[in-house]
Amino acid sequence: MAARIPVLLKTPYEVIVGHDSLPRAGEFIAQILPAGKCGLVTDENVAPLYAGTVRDSLTDAGFSVTTVTIPAGENSKSLHQTGEICDRLIAGGVDRGGFLVALGGGVVGDLAGFAASVYSRGIPHIQIPTTVVAQVDSSIGGKTGVNSRAGKNLIGSFHQPALVITDPDTLATLPKREFNEGMAEVIKHAVIRDAALLDDLEDIARIDLPSLIARNVKIKATIIAADEFETEGLRAQLNFGHTIGHAIENAAGYGRYLHGEAISLGLAAALYLSVKKAGFPPADAERTLGILRSLHLPVRLPADLTTDALMAALSHDKKFQAGAIRYILSEKPGSAFVSKDITADDLREAIEHIRE
Ligand SMILES: NC(=O)c1ccc[n+]([C@@H]2O[C@H](COP(=O)([O-])OP(=O)(O)OC[C@H]3O[C@@H](n4cnc5c(N)ncnc54)[C@H](O)[C@@H]3O)[C@@H](O)[C@H]2O)c1
């Protein structure tokens, strides 16, 4: 039985999580959208694995499909690819009554969601996420966008999906390293919202994957429902570990760390500051680091990434609003808050602390 998790916004939508939901995608979409033309955006790795199943299910449900396969990887999150998708939709006759399906990881989801938000002044989009990151995080919440030469995600919009269809079976083909990096977001969710999940993650082998995904979807859905546009400080809690994580990602340069690996280092720094500034129990910080290590995620910073380079990268972070540092801390497993008491010296100290 698939779980149906509501995302309770003004226009609510559901996240369907369950085995074998991929072949039923057309049937699920037909329950909420009228027959017509649609685009199916995927990438060159995902296309041979899953696009046929999704396309057939859409066709069987009465939809006429234009498939757009983009090159895999972050470089595809561009205005250029947005234009390519729009051109293909126009050529395929997709009109204002149509919709877009994003089948893939966060790159496909963010790009196709953004294309849907501008095509014909906005058409619905359906997310079918196929990575851990996309299933527990990026497919839910409506943040869509592409990168500019100046930085990641600088061009974008809020455009909530009409439906998210999540089939955990698709994770079976995900390379191990990509699977593990996605788990960094799961561990983050546990620290900020679900203490029992942190306990369960200590014995990962025993966790049922669909339940794990559903549990994380609920966490993200609850936060989104309470703070759709990131104005209440709640959605900002999802940035736990991300401030220093992003700085490491930027300073290390493209290709060295996967995003989740940099976030793992950022989590190590955030845990240190949480212990020091918010009374987070040191034993819980230690076991969280143990969970990260058990997934082969890095928690120690190599010497060549200098503190000065990371501090320089931090000063460009858009979360450093008007010079005031807003930093997410946790006082105990399952909770988090936005702190304004963290100084640049604290960040420097945390970076030094996580050194090898
Ligand atoms: N919108 C949001 O709220 C949000 C949140 C977090 C991350 N993101 C964005 O998500 C992107 C990262 O997403 P990602 O980590 O999913 O990366 P990704 O989309 O690049 O996917 C990682 C790799 O796995 C491949 N792949 C995907 N599914 C597969 C499967 N089932 N089997 C085999 N291979 C598969 C892809 O082709 C790609 O090579 C970033 O651009 C980030 O900015 C957005």
Image: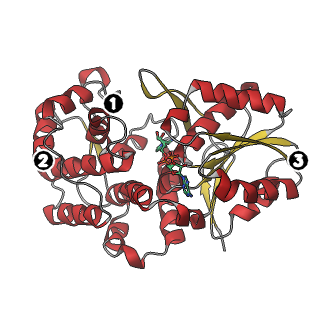
Image colouring: secondary structure
The amino acid marked with disc number 3 is Ala
How far apart, in angstroms, are the residues tagged by discs 3 and 1? 42 Å
Q: Between tags 1 and 2, which lies in front?
A: 2
The amino acid marked with disc number 1 is Lys
Q: Give the percent coordinates (x, y) of residue 265.
A: 25, 49
Whether the residue under disc 2 has CB within 8 Å of ligand 1:
no
Q: Local crowd at mark 1 within 10 Å, few (<14), some, or many (≥20)?
A: some
Contact (CB < 8 A) between labels 1 and 2?
A: no
Q: Which one is earlier in the sequence, the residue at label 1 or at label 2?
A: 1
Question: Which residue is denoted by mark 1 in the rendering?
Answer: 319
In the image, residue 292 sits, relative to residue 277, either above or below, namely: below
Q: Between tags 3 and 2, which lies in front?
A: 2
In the image, residue 216 sits, relative to residue 47, either above or below, namely: below
The residue depicted at 29 percent of the width and 38 percent of the height is 243
Whether the residue under disc 3 has CB within 8 Å of ligand 1:
no
Q: Between tags 3 and 1, which lies in front?
A: 3
The amino acid marked with disc number 2 is Arg
Q: Which one is earlier in the sequence, the residue at label 3 or at label 1?
A: 3
Residue 35 circle label: 3
In the image, residue 18 sits, relative to residue 328, either above or below, namely: below
Question: Which residue is denoted by mark 2 in the rendering?
Answer: 355
Q: Local crowd at mark 3 within 10 Å, few (<14), some, or many (≥20)?
A: some
The residue depicted at 30 percent of the width and 24 percent of the height is 316
Q: Give the percent coordinates (x, y) of residue 199.
A: 31, 72
Horizontal arrangement in the rendering, residue 245 relative to residue 71 (left or right): left
The residue depicted at 86 percent of the width and 49 percent of the height is 63
